[in-house]
Amino acid sequence: MSFLKKSTVLTVLTFVFVLAAGIFVPAKTSFAATKPSLNSASGTVFLYTQDTLEVQDIPSGLERISWSSSNTSVLKVKSNSKTGVECTLLPKKAGTATVTCTVVSSEKTYTLTCKIKVKKANPFKKIYIEGKNKHKAKASTITYETSNKKVKVSTKMYKGWTLVSKEYEVYNTATSTKAIKDVPSNNKVPIGNYQTKVYFTAINSSNESFTYTVVLKKKISATAKPSFANKSETIFLKTTNNEVSIKNFPNGASTIWSSSNTSVATVKKSSESDGTAILTPKKKGSTTIQCIVTKVDGSVSTISYTLNVKSKVKPLEAVKIDGSNIISKTKNNYYKFKTTDHSVLVQSYENSGWTITEEKYTVYKTPTIYGNETKITGNGEVSIGTYKTVVKVKLRNKSKAYYTFTLELYNSNYKK
């Protein structure tokens, strides 16, 4: 029997859950013969943000843990893990709700509660990026593309709120980060090879905290030198939506893609970007994938790599949507799901021999208008776009072969 192993993709949360006595900090979970408790009896959460509650001192003989909200129109709760030790708090509108956690052990059933107040908050009047206000209301994150090596970012607060910290985090790849540092006095932060995140944290007179995140994405220049990340890659039979992307794809460039052996695999330019193509495996074997890149200045670069096609595999033991495993319903490496919720929890578990390397999602407002790819946080919550949200889970095996699972979450309320 194989054991489910949760992928842990750690990110900095853009929200801080604040209690009457201070900031809400999850304690270390332990299994003991003592009475369980929640890590808080009350707290405040702001709209457009999220946080978690956690059970402490788990009793021996644990059978199950369940969570509920007394007012789901104000606050929804969703279990985050197989054991249910932690749950995500999802605020919907201003008001009050009581979160109830039922802990069932072989000896006794415990009922734990936490009173949550959901509030509206608008601490930040302006978010300046390179001298222009880019602040978005009803949000706690904004994304901005830049080709500059350094960018000046600053804020203007509303009355009643005080800015207590300005920090930034440099990403040289999607998952490789440097230590968080304070924003310097000139408010200029360096832009990583992939992106830089800036965190502005403010508190009010009640010592409640709100963090606004600015994501500064690296914009590639029109004269950049394109390349493929590796000299060879592997995909598997019975898979769809296999993508290949050009590294340092020049801004504004056009492409012509080809496969040297279309009986092994075909390649087609993606409808979303000239620098990305879709690979379709046909049979076991090898082929050369070539791309001719024409830059806006007329110069041409021809790049290629070897694509290997191997037999069908099963890298994922489970993919859960709001706790329900859908892996048995999937067609190859793809699944389509409809929902009326504003967000869902997506949790992936790999089979032995495979490791989840990336979990990301893209929000679509319409079939053609979409945002930047975003890394899924540790608890797995994914926002649902006005049209849909696309989740991609990337895995790697011991032979360094990659496999991508695609989950399309469609908004049932979408109207053209």
Image (cartoon, rainbow, N blue to C red):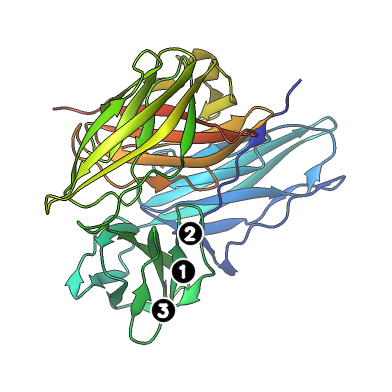
Q: Could you tell me residue 334's position as x and y percent? A: 42, 21
Q: Could you tell me residue 48's position as x and y percent? A: 36, 52
Query: Which of marks 2 and 3 precedes in the sequence?
Result: 2
Residue holding disc 1:
208
Q: Amino acid at mark 1?
A: Glu
Query: Which of marks 2 and 1 precedes in the sequence?
Result: 2
Query: Which of marks 3 and 1 precedes in the sequence?
Result: 3
* Res. 40 image quadrant: bottom right
Q: Amino acid at mark 2?
A: Thr
Image position of 331 (left or right of 352):
left
Q: Is residue 20 above or below residue 162?
A: above
Q: CA distance from mark 1 to mark 2?
A: 8 Å
User: Residue at 29% of width from left, 54% of height from top?
Assistant: 225
Residue that protrudes farthest toward the bottom in the picture: 185
Q: Nearer the viewer, mark 1 or mark 3?
A: 3
Q: CA distance from mark 3 to mark 2?
A: 28 Å
